Amino acid sequence: MKNSQMLVLKFIRKNSLVSRAKIAKSVGLSKPAVSEAVDHLLKLGVIKEVKKGESSKRGGKRPILLEFNPQFRFVVGVDLGGTNLRVALTDLNGKILHRNDFSSKGISSPELLLDRIVDAIKSLNFEPKSVLGIGVGVPGTVDPKSGLVRYMPAFGIKDFPLKEALQNTFKKPVLLGNDVTLNALGEMWKGSAKGKKNLLLVSLGTGTGMGIIINGELYEGSNGMAGELGYTITDWSREKDHNFPFGRLERWFSGYAFEKILLKDSAHTSVKDFFELAQKDSVLASFLEEACGHLALAISNAVCLFDPEIVVLGGAIGYNQYEIITSKVMPILKSTVPNEILEHISFERASLGDSGVLLGAVNLVQREIFVV
């Protein structure tokens, strides 16, 4: 697309039901240039004419209004988790048109993983020509340049060229990202952080991670490994000798750690059980208090480094236990973070639930291949 067409499309997408005259006035292009761009976009089907607007005070013809066509193309989003594999087909506005959920348990080889993902994507029954691309959120580290999945601890798989494999299968562009990072992107696009440009999403689930967005752009680091909050050190004197299978913070705060505590002296095994029992069991209550203290210190360090507009708590634990966690974390943040920093930061529960990674994956595809 020419620059003039891109300008016009961006404006129409952000300002529905606009006239050619308003576009010309707003984007600084001449009326003939706008008309030429609009005609081209109408031919492509990216925009459409919908209805006539009101005449000006001087009378004359009523202007024809334009709007973006969200079904010009579709996007496939994939959320690959250690327990569930979710796939969705959406329009360009992020409206989920078709979604299927599958189990991802028992995957132990790259071949089985690829087969499971391919079958899940095919279950959406889309017309290949209509799809812009495929976005995939993975529970591990990804090289953003090559699309190589460095490591997925949930499956014990390392150095897997998932992007290349999916592109060879579907003959479509494939974009990969860490699932927590894409969750942050989803929340900025359609969720609790909508309208914000600087945010941290703290994902609390089996493990603990962070998605970082700076000035409206994903921050993945030089090798796609930024945001590994679970490796944060919050008490070196006690964590020096480390033999935990996750990071040092995850030794204190993670679904894995909570389940391990329960298994010591209880028949209960779920994280939900842990939080319920901690309301009446003094030992579990003490562990939860300490766990939240370590989490608070990690978040404190992060907000002092990045100065975000908003911190969003997501993941299964962050979403379901939001009130309990924030009631224990916020007092510590207030005592460790200077007020001139903390007073400008809002804290919210993630609002997209288990659609967050899917929508983040969809948004990633659009950012790289289309115009948002």
Image: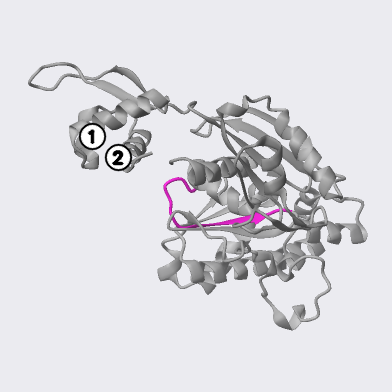
Which residues are drawn in magenta? Answer: 193-205
- Closer to the N terminus: mark 1 or mark 2? 2
Question: Could one spot residue 17 in this view of the protein?
Answer: no
The residue furthest bottom is: 237
- Amino acid at pointer 1: Ala
Identify the residue at image location x=82%, y=69%: 244
Report whether 14 appears left or right of 260: left
Q: Is residue 340 magenta?
A: no
In the rendered structure, find residue 296 and report the number of the disc placed on it: none
The residue furthest left is: 58
Q: Are marks 1 and 2 in contact (CB under 8 Å)?
A: yes
Q: Is residue 143 above or below residue 363?
A: below
Cα distance in 3D space between marks 1 and 2: 7 Å
Identify the residue at image location x=28%, y=23%: 65
Question: Could one spot residue 195 in this view of the protein?
Answer: yes
Secondary structure, mark 1, is helix
In the rendered structure, find residue 33 and report the number of the disc placed on it: 1
Packing grade of label 1 (10 A; few <14, some 14-19, many >=20) is some
Viewer-nearest residue: 132 or 138: 132
Q: Which residue is mark 2?
A: 4
Quadrant assignment for the N terminus: top left
